[in-house]
Image (spheres, grey):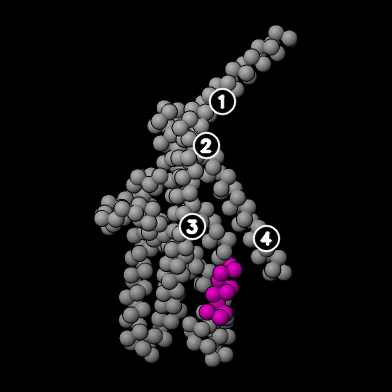
Amino acid sequence: MGAWFENFKANIGTWFESFKATFQLNFIDDNRYMYLVNGLKNTLIITVFAALLGIALGIIVASVRTTFDKNEESMRMRNKGLYIVMKIANTVCKVYLTVIRGTPVVVQLMIMYFIIMASSTNSVLIAILAFGINSGAYVAEIFRGGIMSIDNGQFEAGRSLGFSYFRTMYHIVVPQVIKNVLPALLNECIALLKETSVAGYVSIQDLTKGGDIIRGRTYSAFMPLIMVALIYLIVVVVLTWLVGKVERRLKVSER
């Protein structure tokens, strides 16, 4: 028993020394940990601004689509010009949703980088635009579902008070929609964070690319990739905790 224990201690000591040497090689030597720090910074910048752009686009697209769906007949009867404008806008929104949701985000990113904005040198801005446009399509459906879930009686109540359709939306419907879709919206932000891991395809040093650079310098794949996965996991766990807290607060406020 004593010999086994001594052998176990020796193996543990050898493993620890090997782990320490590998950790130093990958993260301490030449300050290679900075690749992860800078990558995480770029990942968070892209995620935050792409999420804001996606929310803005999503609200616009959802508003156009729901306004047309709910008022198509009345616009056709009362204002032919407005009906034509809204019909064109609704068609454009449908095409946008079909194209964006029907193609991979990495392909959209590469089209934005190599074709649409090939003359730009700001790769982070290009990534923000690409991921923001992609996220906007999904946010639009989240908001549209939230608006369509509001009972028509709410719209009728607003109109009976003398509100226009847009004032009814602003004062009565939108506050309820935001409350209903907030958890789904936060979950979309979590998904967006993970989607940005493909930004390295266009030479952006995001978190994943930072780990890949370390792997290329040290020829050690295990520790850099595990560290990248661990950082993503920690960020996602924190965001998931925040989503859960928001959902619990919303449930309490409904009582």
Q: Which mark is residue 248?
A: 4
Identify which residue is drawn at 63% across, 61% down.
Answer: 246
Amino acid type for the residue under numbered disc 4: Arg
Give x and y (percent) for residue 93.
Answer: 37, 69
- Across and down, in percent, residue 121 comes to 31, 53
Pointer 2 with pointer 3, Cβ within 8 A? no
Q: Earlier in the sequence, mark 4 or mark 2?
A: 2
SS of the residue under disc 2: helix
Tell which residue pokes out farthest to the right in this image. 1
Name which residue type carries label 3.
Val
Is 173 a magenta residue?
Answer: yes
Q: Is residue 167 above or below residue 17?
A: below
Between circles 1 and 3, the one closer to the viewer is 1
- The mark closer to the camera, 4 or 2, is 2
Q: Which residues are magenta?
A: 170-180
Q: In the image, is residue 154 above or below residue 111? A: below
The label shown at residue 20 is 1
Residue lying farthest to the front in this orientation: 30
Q: Earlier in the sequence, mark 3 or mark 4?
A: 3
Q: What is the crowding at mark 4: few (fewer than 14 residues within 10 Å), some, or many (at least 20)?
A: few
Q: Position of residue 26 (x, y in %)?
A: 48, 30
